[in-house]
C-alpha cells in the first residue's frame, strides 16, 4: 500500500530518484519565470521545469485552451475516430517544421516518441524491401527516454545493463565530448566531420546494409549539454545518405525554440528523415509528443492495403483533445511572443554571462548554445555528483532552480527570461561556486 501520510515513502516511488533521501522540496504554484515553494519562497526556474516549459508557467492562452476543451470535447477515440483539434494541430505544426515534414504521429511523451520513431524506421525499411535492415545505431551518452527502445539506443550503460539484451543488433557511436573538453569554452571545434566518421566505422563493422537508422540528439542535453563540433551532423547526414540509413533527430529538448530556431535541424542546417519531439510541444503542461515524418517515408509504409496489418501503432491518448488544445495554446503563445526565435536574440548575452564564470574554483568547462548552458565541475575524488548536487541545494536555498547531471550543472530557462534574470542566475552561481567545497 502507498503510505501517503509518509512523505518519504510517497516520494521515493514517485521520483525513483536515489538522491532524494530526505523529505522532498515541494513546489505549490508557478507563474511565468518563478515557482513558489511550500514554505512560500520564490524560486527562479533556471531549467524550464525539465527542459519543457519553454513559455514559462501559468500562461493564459494555454490555461484557457485546456479549460475550454475540457468542457467541450474531453476525449475522442484515437482509433477509427478523430476530432478537429488534432488535425488543426498537425497542420499548424507542419508549418513550423523544416520543409517536407508533412506527417505527424502523436504520442504522450518523449520516450514514446522515440520508440515510435524507431518502429517507423524499421517499418519503412521493410516496406522498401530492406527487411534485413534491422539494426539501430545510437551514440554513447545519448539519452532517449526510459522505454525499451530508448534505453537500447541510449548511451547510458547504467540505465540499461540490468535489462538484459534489450533490442538486439543495436550499437553506439562514440560521443562528441571528451576529445577536447575545453574547446567548447572558446568556440566550435572543427573536427566534426572526423568524429562523425565513427558512424562509418560502426557501419563497416556490421555491414551498412543491415542498418535501419541512426538516432542522435543534435545537442545531447540530459547527459550534460554536449554541443557537437562543427560539421558533425552534416557528415552524419552524408554517411546515412551514402548507405541508405535513415537519420533520426531526437529533438525532445532542442525542439520548439530552445536554440533560437524552431528546431535544431534549422539551427544546424541538417534535415533528418524523422524528427522526435515532446516537452515544449505543450509547454510541458500536458503529456504529449509528436514524431514528424517526411512524405516519402510516410507513403512508403502507410499507404497500400497491407499497412494496417504490417504497422500496428498508436496509443489510447494519441492526439487527445485536451493535449491537442494545450499544444495549440502553446503554439499561439510561442508565435505571438516570438519565442521560437527569442533564444537567438538572447544567446550572446547568455553565453557572455555563462563564460563570466570562467576561472572560478572547480569549474573545468563551460558550454552554451541557444538558451542552454552547462557548467562542468571537477568531481570530488571518490564522491562523484556530490559537488554539483551541493551547488543544487545552495542554489535552491538562494532562490534558483538548476539541474545537475553527474558533476555538470545544466541550465535551460524558459525562453521568456529577461536579461536581469540571466544576471540573477549567474550572480547567484558565482557566489555559490566561489564558496563551494
Ligand atoms: N529524448 C530526450 C532527448 C530527452 O531529453 C528526454 C527527456 N529528458 C526523452 C527523450 C524522454 O522524454 P520523456 O521523459 O517525456 O519520456
Image: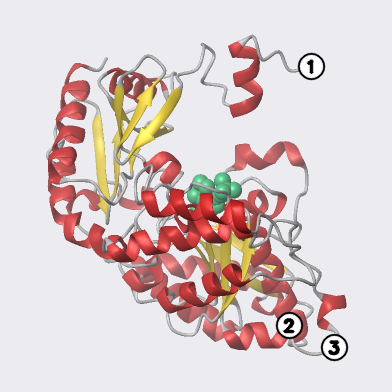
Residue name at image x 37 percent, y 71 percent = 193
Please, what secondary structure does the residue beneath circle 3 have? loop
Disc 2 marks which residue? 302
Residue 415 in the figure: left or right of residue 403? left
C-alpha distance separating marks 3 and 1 = 48 Å
Disc 1 marks which residue? 1
* Whether residue 380 is visible: no
Foreground residue among 18 and 107:
107
Disc 3 marks which residue? 305
Please, what secondary structure does the residue beneath circle 2 have? helix
**Residue at disc 3, CB closer than 8 Å to ligand 1:** no
* Dot 2 alpha-carbon crowd within 10 angstroms: few under 14, some 14 to 19, many 20 or more: some
User: Which of the labelled discs sits on residue 179, or is there none?
Assistant: none
Residue name at image x 35 percent, y 51 percent = 55
Foreground residue among 305 and 247:
305
Decide which of tag 2 and tag 1 comes sooner along the chain: 1
Residue 161 in the figure: left or right of residue 434? right
C-alpha distance separating marks 3 and 2 = 9 Å
Amino acid at each position: 500500500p502507498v503510505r501517503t501520510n509518509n512523505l518519504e515513502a510517497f516520494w521515493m516511488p514517485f521520483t525513483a530518484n536515489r538522491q532524494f533521501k530526505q523529505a522532498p522540496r515541494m513546489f505549490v504554484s508557478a507563474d511565468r519565470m518563478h515557482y513558489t515553494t511550500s514554505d512560500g519562497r520564490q524560486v527562479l526556474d533556471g531549467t524550464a521545469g525539465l527542459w519543457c516549459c519553454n513559455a514559462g508557467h501559468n500562461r493564459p492562452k494555454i490555461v484557457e485552451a485546456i479549460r475550454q476543451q475540457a468542457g467541450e470535447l474531453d476525449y475522442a477515440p484515437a482509433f477509427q475516430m478523430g476530432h478537429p483539434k488534432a488535425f488543426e494541430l498537425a497542420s499548424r505544426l507542419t508549418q513550423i517544421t523544416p520543409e517536407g515534414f508533412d506527417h505527424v504521429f502523436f504520442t504522450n511523451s518523449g520516450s514514446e516518441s522515440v520508440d515510435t520513431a524507431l518502429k517507423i524506421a524499421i517499418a519503412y525499411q521493410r516496406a522498401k524491401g530492406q527487411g534485413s535492415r534491422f539494426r539501430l545505431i545510437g551514440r554513447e551518452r545519448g539519452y532517449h527516454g526510459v522505454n525499451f527502445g530508448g534505453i537500447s539506443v541510449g548511451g547510458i550503460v547504467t540505465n540499461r545493463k540490468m535489462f538484459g539484451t534489450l533490442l538486439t543488433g543495436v550499437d553506439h557511436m562514440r560521443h562528441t565530448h571528451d576529445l577536447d573538453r575545453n574547446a567548447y569554452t572558446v568556440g566550435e571545434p572543427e573536427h566534426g566531420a572526423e568524429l562523425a566518421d565513427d558512424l562509418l566505422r560502426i557501419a563497416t563493422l556490421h555491414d551498412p546494409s543491415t542498418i535501419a537508422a541512426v538516432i542522435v540528439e543534435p545537442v545531447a542535453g540530459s547527459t550534460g549539454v554536449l554541443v557537437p563540433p562543427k560539421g558533425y551532423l552534416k557528415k552524419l547526414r552524408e554517411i546515412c545518405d551514402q548507405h541508405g540509413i535513415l537519420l533520426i533527430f531526437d529533438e525532445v529538448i532542442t525542439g520548439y525554440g530552445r536554440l533560437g530556431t524552431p528546431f535544431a535541424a534549422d539551427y544546424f542546417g541538417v534535415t533528418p528523415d524523422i524528427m522526435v519531439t515532446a516537452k515544449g510541444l505543450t509547454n510541458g503542461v500536458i503529456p504529449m509528443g509528436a514524431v514528424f515524418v517526411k512524405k516519402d517515408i510516410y507513403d512508403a509504409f502507410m499507404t497500400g492495403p497491407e499497412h494496417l496489418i504490417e504497422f500496428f501503432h498508436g496509443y489510447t491518448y494519441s492526439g487527445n483533445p485536451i493535449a491537442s488544445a494545450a499544444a495549440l495554446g502553446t503554439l499561439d503563445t510561442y508565435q505571438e511572443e516570438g519565442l521560437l526565435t527569442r533564444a537567438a536574440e538572447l544567446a550572446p548575452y547568455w553565453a557572455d554571462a555563462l563564460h563570466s564564470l570562467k576561472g572560478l574554483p572547480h569549474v573545468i568547462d563551460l558550454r552554451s548554445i541557444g538558451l542552454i548552458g552547462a557548467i562542468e565541475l571537477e568531481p570530488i575524488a571518490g564522491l562523484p555528483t556530490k559537488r554539483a548536487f551541493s551547488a543544487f541545494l545552495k542554489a535552491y536555498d538562494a532562490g534558483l532552480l538548476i539541474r545537475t547531471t553527474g558533476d555538470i550543472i545544466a541550465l535551460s530557462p524558459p525562453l521568456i527570461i529577461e536579461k536581469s534574470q540571466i544576471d540573477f542566475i549567474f550572480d547567484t552561481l558565482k557566489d555559490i561556486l566561489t564558496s563551494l567545497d
